[in-house]
Structures are given as structure tokens and as C-alpha cells.
Amino acid sequence: MVSHLYERKESDQEFDNEVKHFIFDIFTHKDVFKIDSERYHYGMPTADGRIVFNPEIIKKVQAIVPRDHTPVYFTQFGGNSYNTLTLLTIATGYDFYSPFVEGVIPGRELIPYNAIRKMIEQNCKIFTDDLSGLAASVSAPIYHVVSPPPIYSSETIDEIKKVSPYFANLTHTEVTPASVRLKAWHCQRQVYKETCDRIGATVLDPPAESLEDGRWLAESCIGSDPTHGNYRYSDLVFQMIESTLKARYVGWEWIK
């Protein structure tokens, strides 16, 4: 996402408002994540059982965003949970009925939807806690950008696997059929949507221009792994954010 901004020019869109993106760099600011070395904590539990946003990050935002600017938060917490669980199939093959995608593949082991939902929900919890913590700590509007949908072509994923060190030591790397991966993506989207509805945040789906047949990540937007979008996808997401705000892009800055 950020690499795209280095070469981006100011927008000539005819909006009265202007938008400047302030980006938090987790790698530069690892010192603010002091609770658990195994993960980056945005949402943090309090002694009375609430979730709040990491106060060190809030301070950094308040210090850099000019007082005459109106802050709006856009998040992309998590997003890979569905792929972690369903990108590669088990040896016997599986499928599940979904309220979002019709049908199942004949002959595959059927797993209850609620079981898949529970696994994805548990895998997403640290990220939905991040969203809940942010909503509890700021009064500004919050938008959550849903992660890119699956790549349709298993052959394309196979080509990515050949050059990815992540798959090098795996003994079983058969890609799960696209329809099953799409069901899992929709399930994950629903988990985030329900969280956003509960905390008063707004869900932004991937830009229509980034989709193939309205469902899959377009070939022109596929990144270097089976989950993330590329430079073009980043451009479309930033354009979507700016259109949502009805504001033209005038620059960006790291949150220091």
C-alpha cells in the first residue's frame, strides 16, 4: 500500500475538501508494542475487561495531525485469516454450505458452516479487538477496508507458490478450490461487518475495479503472494478512500 504513495502525484479531482494520509509504520515503532512480543497490539485489554486502542499510537496520531484537520480513521487490521485456514486443502478435500455462495462440490467432505465460522472468528479476534479498541478510544469516524477477495485461478497461486519461501517446507500444497476459498472470504467479511456494525464503524468492500466477475481479485491487481494486492490495487483503494470522503489527495506522511 505505502510503496504506491512514494510516486503518487496530487489529485486533480474536483472536490472542495482535501485529504492527507497519515500512515502508521509498525516496523519503525515496534517500541510501542510492549505487551506481547508475539504480536503487534493495537487493541489492548484494560483491568476492568474493556478493550482500548494502544495509547502510545493515539498520542503519536494526536501529535502529528494538525488541529485544523478533521481526522478519519481507515483500518486494514488482519485480513489473511481466511487464507491461513483455507488456502491449502486437506488430503481428503472439504467444502461447506454458505449463506453467501451457493452449492458444494460433490464428493468432498462437508464441514458445518458454523464450524468454519468459529475458526475464522477465533483467528480474527485479535484484529476485531483492534477495531473495538479504536472505536472505544476515538470519537472520529472509522472505516474498515475489507481485504482483497481470493484469486480465482489455482494455477496462478501455484506459480506464486514456486517462488514463495513460505511454501518451501510444506509437504501438501494442493490449493483449495476457488469456490471454497470464496466462501471462507465471505465468512470472514461477515465477521468484520458484524464487528463494525456493533462499534459504529463503516465497512468498505474492495473497489469494484479490482474485481473479476464481481467476485475474484482481478489479474491486474494480484500481488506477490496469494493474499495481498499489488501497486494497482493500492491505487484503487486510495482512490476509493478519497471518493468516500469526497476529497482530493494532496499528500501523505509517516506517523512519527
Image (cartoon, rainbow, N blue to C red):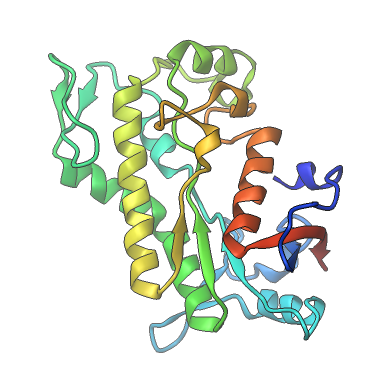
- From the viewer's perspective, tell me whether residue 121 is left or right of residue 110: right
Where residue 143 sits in the image (x, y, percent)? 52, 64
Q: Residue furthest bottom?
A: 48
Give the image quarter of residue 70: bottom right
Check the image and report above or below for 133 versus 156: below
Who's the residue at 57% across and 27% down the image? 166
Choose top left, top right, bottom left or bottom right for residue 57.
bottom right
Q: Write the residue at 79% across / 52% down.
A: 11
Residue 233 image offset from top left, x and y in percent: 63, 37
- Which is more toward the observer, 79 or 165? 79
Quarter of the figure with the C terminus: bottom right
In depth, the one of 153 and 203 nearer the eye is 203
Above/below status of 94 relative to 14: above
Instruction: Say left or right for 68 vs 225.
Output: right
- Give the answer, above or below, for where 63 lies relative to 94: below
* Residue at the farthest front position: 14
Write the residue at 60% across / 35% down: 229
As rendered, which of 10 and 126 lies closer to the eye?
A: 10
* Left or right of 167 in this view: 109: left
Counting from the top left corner in percent of width and height, residue 10 is at 84, 53
Please give the count of numbered marks on the rendered protein.
0
- Whether 49 is drawn above or below 150: the answer is below
Q: Is residue 31 left or right of residue 91?
A: right
Residue 235 placement (x, y as % from top left) = 69, 42
Quarter of the picture holding the N terminus? top right
